[in-house]
């Protein structure tokens, strides 16, 4: 059995996975309990699909593949260096995981190759199901049980070799493979990620309030970013890496050797102003095969407005005034907010008054009145 496990790990490493471990298929009881409480406490409220039923399914391997016997758990690093830009452009930050190609496609394809190679090794087909992020599996709980990493207080899985800068994936299978033991490392007394999270989203160790997390606000949230949170989002336009950037475990880690996760264009620190005038078709072409497309054009433009408001640079005023005429009330509203944050001069004031005369959406009217100092 151990020969099988070692051979499987060798194949995984050869295919480019940085960590490979084996987890058993017992129900993830403690994770289920904490996920259930997270839902009941309203901390997953913004993700309507994350229900108590989903939490139960995600933590019950037997329901994900009846008759399963093991989980092959993998981690693959996306950690690439930051580039310095000295061109003076107004740039917004993108979380590192989204600098390269969409990881779902890359990792699922490779996990299928992994299955084929295991079938070649054992000389027969077996039953399997693959999970990478978007499936009904608790990826982190599987990873922890397989020993490839441990839970940090920011709730990310930390690996010894690549820190938390890893994607997680699994092959759940009816092959019997001896499980590995969990890695018993912990964060010790460290609380840095909790202290540095700008929105206070890490409410307690290992407990994220989804609805406060900048990652949720800039990627998953489809409507308005709550006004009180906008200043805290800073210049993040897609995701957030603060609780990983500050983590001491992440300081001396190996870089990713995966070419598919190399930075594309300036997707690490994206030039903001041109994004404001992007059309749907241009958006589709620019962000084809990029995780960033998940925000959709409306979400991305909304985020760009917030980042520009927080950067406070007057060069953004004219493009933002154009965005005040956008067909989406969400973009109009956030553009007005951004102008208010930058500070409005007399010319801008005249234009915003004109916009107020023409505006019909109550959210934008409120935002305009607020910025013009006319709130009732
Ligand atoms: C929903 C989701 C989000 C939501 C909610 C985040 C959340 N905390 O759940 C949002 C949009 C905010 C998000 C953000 C991010 N995400 Co996300 N997300 C997911 C998804 C789809 C489900 C996660 C889930 O089950 N949440 C439910 C809650 C209850 O689980 P949890 O927060 O992990 O909490 C666990 C711990 O608290 C643990 N626990 C509780 N008490 C205790 C006590 C102790 C002592 C211990 C040890 C553990 C422990 O039990 C809980 C249940 O397992 C997974 C993919 C998947 N299918 O699993 C990716 C996933 C977790 N995300 C991932 C990534 C990369 C991110 C971001 C880093 C992206 C970014 N840079 O913007 C951020 C990180 C934010 C953060 N600090 O968590 C990776 C994480 C990789 C890793 N190394 O851990 C995953 C695994 C995707 C993947 N396959 O690679 N994400
Ligand atoms: S990703 Fe950002 S907002 Fe979310 S918990 Fe980490 S530091 Fe806080
Ligand atoms: S910053 Fe500190 S507390 Fe947070 S995950 Fe890293 S080691 Fe753990």
Image (cartoon, rainbow, N blue to C red):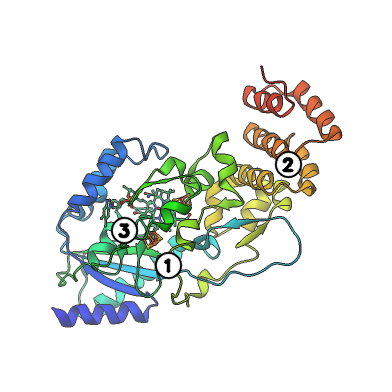
Circle 3 sits in a helix, a strand or a loop, which is it? helix
2 and 3 marks in contact (CB < 8 Å): no
Circle 1 sits in a helix, a strand or a loop, which is it? helix
Residue 342, label in figure: 2
Q: Residue 341's spot in the image, x, y percent?
A: 69, 39
Disc 3 CB within 8 Å of nearest ligand 1 atom: yes
**How many residues crowd mark 3 within 10 Å: few (<14), some (14–19), many (20+)?**
many
Residue located beneath label 3 in the image: 140
In the picture, residue 289 is in which quadrant? bottom right
Instruction: Find the distance from the CA under tag 2 to the CA under tag 1.
Output: 35 Å
Q: Is residue 47 above or below residue 19?
A: above
Residue 79, label in figure: none
Left or right of 69? Residue 321 is right
Which quadrant of the figure contains the N terminus?
bottom left
Residue 248, label in figure: 1
Determine if residue 291 is in view. yes
Q: Residue 358's spot in the image, x, y percent?
A: 76, 23
**How many residues crowd mark 1 within 10 Å: few (<14), some (14–19), many (20+)?**
some
Please name whichever residue, 357 or 338, is drawn nearer the observer in this view of the structure: 338
In the picture, residue 325 is in which quadrant? top right
Please name whichever residue, 175 or 260, is drawn nearer the observer in this view of the structure: 260
Instruction: Find the distance from the CA under tag 3 to the CA under tag 1.
Output: 20 Å
Nearer the camera: disc 2 or disc 3: 2
| Residue located 60% across and 67% down the image | 264
Instruction: Indicate which disc, 3 or 1, sits on the residue closer to the N terminus.
Output: 3
């Amino acid at each position: 059995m151990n020969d099988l496990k070692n051979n499987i790990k060798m194949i995984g490493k050869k295919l480019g996975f940085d960590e490979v471990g084996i987890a058993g298929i017992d129900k993830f009881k403690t994770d289920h309990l904490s996920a259930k409480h997270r839902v009941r406490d309203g901390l997953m409220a913004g993700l309507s699909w994350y229900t108590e039923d989903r939490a139960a399914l995600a933590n019950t391997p037997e329901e994900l593949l009846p008759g399963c016997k093991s989980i092959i758990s993998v981690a693959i690093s996306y950690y690439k260096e930051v580039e310095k830009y000295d061109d003076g452009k107004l740039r917004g930050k993108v979380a590192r995981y989204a600098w390269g190609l969409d990881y779902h496609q890359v990792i699922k394809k490779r996990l299928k190759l992994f299955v084929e190679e295991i079938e070649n090794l054992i000389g027969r087909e077996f039953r399997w199901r693959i999970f990478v992020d978007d499936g009904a599996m608790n990826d982190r709980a599987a990873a922890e049980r397989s020993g490839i990493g441990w839970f940090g207080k920011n709730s990310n899985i930390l690996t010894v070799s690549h820190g938390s800068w890893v994607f997680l994936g699994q092959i759940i299978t009816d092959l019997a493979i001896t499980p590995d033991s969990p890695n018993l490392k912990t964060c010790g007394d460290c609380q840095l990620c909790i202290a540095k999270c700008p929105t206070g989203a890490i409410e307690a160790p290992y407990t994220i309030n989804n609805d406060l997390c900048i990652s949720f606000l800039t990627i998953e949230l489809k409507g308005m970013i709550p006004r009180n949170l906008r200043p805290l989002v800073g210049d993040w336009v897609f995701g957030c890496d603060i609780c990983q950037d500050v983590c001491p475990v992440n300081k001396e880690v190996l870089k990713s050797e995966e070419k598919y996760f190399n930075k594309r264009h300036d997707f690490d620190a994206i030039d903001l102003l041109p994004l404001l005038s992007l059309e749907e078709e241009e958006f589709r072409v620019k962000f084809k095969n990029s995780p960033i497309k998940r925000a959709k054009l409306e979400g991305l433009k909304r985020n760009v407005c917030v980042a520009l408001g927080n950067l406070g640079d007057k060069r953004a005023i004219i493009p933002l005034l154009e965005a005040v005429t956008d067909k989406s009330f969400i973009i109009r509203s956030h553009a007005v907010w951004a102008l208010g944050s930058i500070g409005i001069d007399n010319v801008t004031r005249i234009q915003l008054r004109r916009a107020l005369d023409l505006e019909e959406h109550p959210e934008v009217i409120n935002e305009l009145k607020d910025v013009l100092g006319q709130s009732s």
